[in-house]
Image (tube, rainbow, N blue to C red):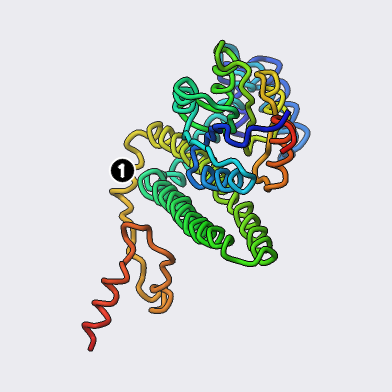
Amino acid sequence: MSVDMNMNILIVDDYKTMLRIIRNLLKQLGFNNVDEATDGSMALQKLRDKDYGLVISDWNMEPMTGIQLLREVRADSKLKNLPFIMITAESKTENVVAAKEAGVNNYIVKPFNAATLKTKLSSVLGNF
Amino acid sequence: MTKIAKSSDAGMPPELNARLSELQVQSRSPSREDVAEVVGEMLQSLEGDLSEVNLKVYSELEGLAKYILAAKREIAALRPDDITSEHLPKATDELDAIVGSTEEATNGILQAMELLEGLTPQMPAEIAEQVTNAVTQVYESCNFQDITGQRITKVVKTLKHIEDRVEALVAAFGDEIQKYRETHPREEQPPQQKTTDEKLLNGPQLPDDAGKQADIDALLASFD
């Protein structure tokens, strides 16, 4: 199955520079329809208002963290199958385990590079 | 020894009286060990609340109280209220300024890279690929801003924790620190401690305190 390069992708991070970096890297990979949110609650609202093919979210945000967002997504009947990648500086085993248990599709540790992002996207969406 | 013998007459238990008399007979100047032994026996013979152990405890407590008093004076001399009112807020402001300036710089770098990347369609394919790769590396490197920001946030939280603890300490001292302040006014820094050049080493100013280039240009122009 080919990857829909026109899919809407939501990136979530409280650091605007990080949003900018991820957006630019996604653009280089051919994904141009990228929206941004700066915390979990804003992201959840956007996810409910528009169709997205992927969420890439930071963990450490306020008021709603990335893991809380993930749990909300998995608990929502309309969003529960949405691919979700966590991209975070939280690199402890317990974090990865918690994210996996909450239903994350993949996990990227900051600082990351473009090759890692592409590999993880391929792993979740299929080769592109 | 005469004094001991005399005091032994006044209601001293017979066993102790006998021991003192024995010592008096044995030697006119008893050794320290002999005296310690007699004193120990005497204390043991005392009835009521005052045992040798109690005396030792009282002595230890007195020593401890003196130690605490001295420690409190030393802590008051450190002026812990200055730590919460001046030093920690200043450190927090400086750290916030670091986050702000690195964010600003990172955005500047990203903006320049985006501009460069936007020009690649006008470049020969081989050059465009090299430029794109270089731009990607810059994007990757700019991750640092997020990581350093999060680390600094952790440091700020630690400082806040220390501030809370010091505030609790200051509260526990009551008005002692204020009294210390009144009795020990801070001495002004002797002017000879810093050279003129050293006084000019202030480091970067916080954004609100920093002189703007336009102000500096105006100042320079005022010399003409």
* Residue at the image point whose x is 31% and y is 42% from the top: B178
Which residue is painted at 67% across and 63% down in the image? Answer: B125
Give the quarter of the image for residue B60.
top right
Q: Is residue B73 left or right of residue A22?
A: left
Report the front residue among B120 and B93.
Answer: B120
Q: Which residue is mark 1?
A: B179
Relative to B133, residue A27 above or below = above
Secondary structure under tag 1 reads helix
Examine the rendered structure and indicate whether residue B203 appears above or below residue B216: above
Residue B78 in sight in this render: no
Q: In this orientation, does residue B148 appear?
A: yes
- B187 relative to A1 in the view: left or right: left
* Dot 1 alpha-carbon crowd within 10 angstroms: few under 14, some 14 to 19, many 20 or more: few
**Given the current orientation, which residue lies at the most extreme bottom position?**
B224
Query: Which image quarter holds the C terminus of chain B?
Result: bottom left
Q: Which residue is more in the foreground, A47 or B99?
A: A47
